[in-house]
Image: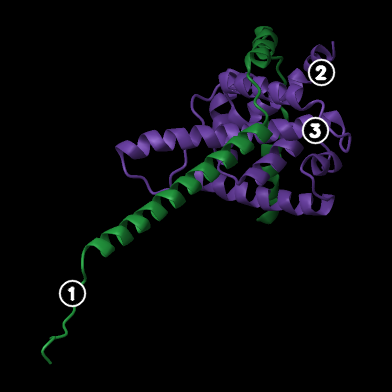
Amino acid sequence: MKSSSNNTMEQLFEKLAQIKKVEPNMHLQNKTFSKFKKQTIISLFWVRAAACLLIIYTVAEVYVASNKLNNHQQDISILIPTTNNILYNE
Amino acid sequence: MIFDDIYSEHRTMVFNLALQYVQNIEDAEEITQDVFVKVFNNLLAYKKQASIKTWMYRITINQSLDFIKFKNARKRNILSSIFSFNDETFKIEPSNFNHPGIILEQKEAYQKIFEAINQLPNNQKTVIILLKIEDKSQAEAAEIMDMNVKALESLFQRAKKKLEILLIQKG
């Protein structure tokens, strides 16, 4: 049983080995070289540097904005007297 | 010129290897272009730890697998926006089987075999292609796949078993 399945697989592999090698089309060389010349190469280093700067800028913006909001809330709390529940006549 | 030499020496190997992964002339040509662009860009960074042929085999294999992954992801996005697919069961076969190395009378039989090969995990697919289609020795295939011969042998046995099951399922 096992040997028959082995034979089947061997036949299949023989079939795969019969696949012919083909030459690529002649125009492919020109296409490849023009693709190579056309590309704009941006170094990964600069992409990473730009990404880091963007992250730093965003974090700074968020930090400044949240600080401003806190200060603003403190200003308001000074202007508006807080009420308490103590009765003065007691 | 060095680029011309590299291209003319390796173009047939790169094109045919890509063809075994995608079974389609247009896609294989696109992969071949991308492989050589990558090779030319990285020629200066190429360290002679492996031979240039092995290095090119690795680039071609990675480029072919990335191409299939990208193409499947694109198709999945388009289709899943129309229908709701289960991600795990959803697998796309390569479109229009057009392998120039196969004679027309046997196209149907080979298409069935390649449909099964395409369902194998990437490393199992690669080991079958290298050993049985590209006719590489175990040592050469092991070097290309960056593993030892024993590990390659057991990977091949697993691939063979899985391929047999897939072919039985297909009938």
**Kind of residue indicated by mark 3:** Trp
Q: Residue at x 21, y 64 (%)?
A: A80
Circle 1 residues within 10 Å: few <14, some 14–19, many ≥20: few
Circle 2 residues within 10 Å: few <14, some 14–19, many ≥20: some
**Kind of residue indicated by mark 1:** Thr
View extreme (left): residue: A89
Instruction: Chain letter for purple, please.
Output: B
Q: Chain of mark 2?
A: B
List x then y, in percent, for residue B31: 63, 24
Q: Which residue is mark 2?
A: B6
User: Who comes first in sequence, dot 2 or dot 3?
Assistant: 2
Q: Which residue is mark 3?
A: B55
Rendered image: mark on residue A83: 1
Q: Please indicate, yes or no, whether residue B78 appears anywhere in the rendered image.
A: yes
Disc 2 element: helix
Q: Please indicate, yes or no, whether residue B171 appears anywhere in the rendered image.
A: no
Instruction: Chain letter for green, please.
Output: A
Q: Chain of mark 1?
A: A
Between residues A59 and A47, which one lies in front from this camera angle? A59
Figure label count: 3
Q: Are the residues flagged by discs 1 and 3 from a single subunit?
A: no
The Cα atoms of the two marked residues, 1 and 2, are separated by: 84 Å
Q: Quadrant of residue A1?
A: bottom right
Determine whether label 2 and label 3 are within 8 Å by CB.
no
The Cα atoms of the two marked residues, 2 and 3, are separated by: 12 Å
Relative to A34, B154 lies left or right:
right
